[in-house]
Amino acid sequence: MSLVFRHAIVVGASSGIGAEIARQLAAGGASVALLGRRADELEQVAAGIVRTGRGRAIVAAHDVTAYDTVPALLERLVRELGGLDLLVYAAGTMFVPGEGEYDFTRERAGIEVNLLGAVAWTIPVAAMFEARRAGTIVGISSIAGERGRRTFPGYSTSKAGLSTWLEALRNRVARHGVNVVTAKPGFVDTPMTAHLEQKPMVISATQAARLILAAARRGGSPSVFVPGRWWLVAMVLRHLPSTVFRRLNI
Ligand SMILES: NC(=O)c1ccc[n+]([C@@H]2O[C@H](COP(=O)([O-])OP(=O)(O)OC[C@H]3O[C@@H](n4cnc5c(N)ncnc54)[C@H](OP(=O)(O)O)[C@@H]3O)[C@@H](O)[C@H]2O)c1
């Protein structure tokens, strides 16, 4: 099977992986709605798409923590796009607390963007797709969600929650012909990871977007590591005893 995406919403399209996914969807001829808080960056991504002469881009400034605004915004975007067959939830933020730093406000902010925003967007879209018995939802989780990590506890918690949420959603809608894809990247070269000194097995946002869209087009509701070789790392991480894992500085 190879699904063709004609109308897509990308939440978190102002930079990094989401922006690349939007560009590649448009290059394939899709009409894409670009969402994020930074209107200027969204306009730049949209202008780049217009310059290529392929596909179409519309822009909507949106903060994913404004949960109550999602249903009306979704309805408007579906109308403006002329339909919807793909939602990509790429919005994310990473708080790395310093040694000895405990900050509820910042941890909550991360969990709201990475997990609750995804729940707020995927609920109405899943309902719409289930009724139509078609559609694809992609959520960008992370290998960081495989274990509770000392370096970014809230981030790893939010990604574990997102992976579980997407699995639960897929278990509800797969029988109605709806495709739910969990993408779990390792290190990707984006503004989010710009501050990191060590990025083993890093790939570009372009490569990450290509692999994520390829998994989405295959259908069958896969959960994939991006790139696939992170599967081995995840398996090792998952099987490390807690007493060993807590000594690692990851
Ligand atoms: N880079 C990696 O190594 C890596 C690895 C695994 C998973 N991921 C995941 O991949 C996804 C994309 O991240 P990236 O690496 O491409 O980083 P990025 O360039 O920083 O992109 C993050 C995106 O999230 C959006 N966003 C953040 N807070 C938001 C909010 N409150 N409302 C709406 N949008 C918001 C940002 O838009 P605005 O700032 O304009 O709002 C931006 O478009 C994230 O979920 C991240 O956790 C990244």
Image (cartoon, rainbow, N blue to C red):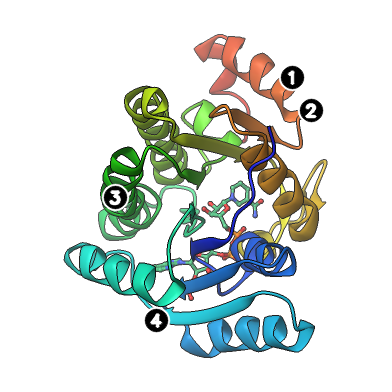
The label shown at residue 61 is 4
Task: Kindly identify which residue carries mark 1.
Answer: 232
The span from disc 4 to disc 2 (Cα, nearest Å) is: 35 Å
The CA distance from mark 2 to mark 1 is 6 Å
Mark 3 — residue? 116
Residue 238 visible in the shown view = yes
Residue 229 disc label: 2
- Of residues 140 and 198, which is closer to you in this image? 140
Residue 175 horizontal/vertical position (percent):
38, 22
First in sequence: mark 1 vs mark 4: 4
**Label 2, ligand 1: CB separation under 8 Å:** no
User: What's the amino acid at mark 4?
Assistant: Ala
Is residue 185 at all visible to an observer of this figure? Answer: no
- Disc 2 crowd rating (10 Å Cα; few below 14, some 14-19, many 20+) is few
| Residue extending farthest left | 68
Circle 3 — which element?
Answer: helix
Q: Which mark is residue 196?
A: none
Residue at position x 70%, y 57% in the image: 196
Q: CA distance from mark 3 to mark 4?
A: 18 Å
Name the residue type under label 2. Arg
Indicate which label's residue lies in the foreground, 4 or 2.
Answer: 4
> What separation in Å lies between label 1 and label 3 (alpha carbons)?
29 Å
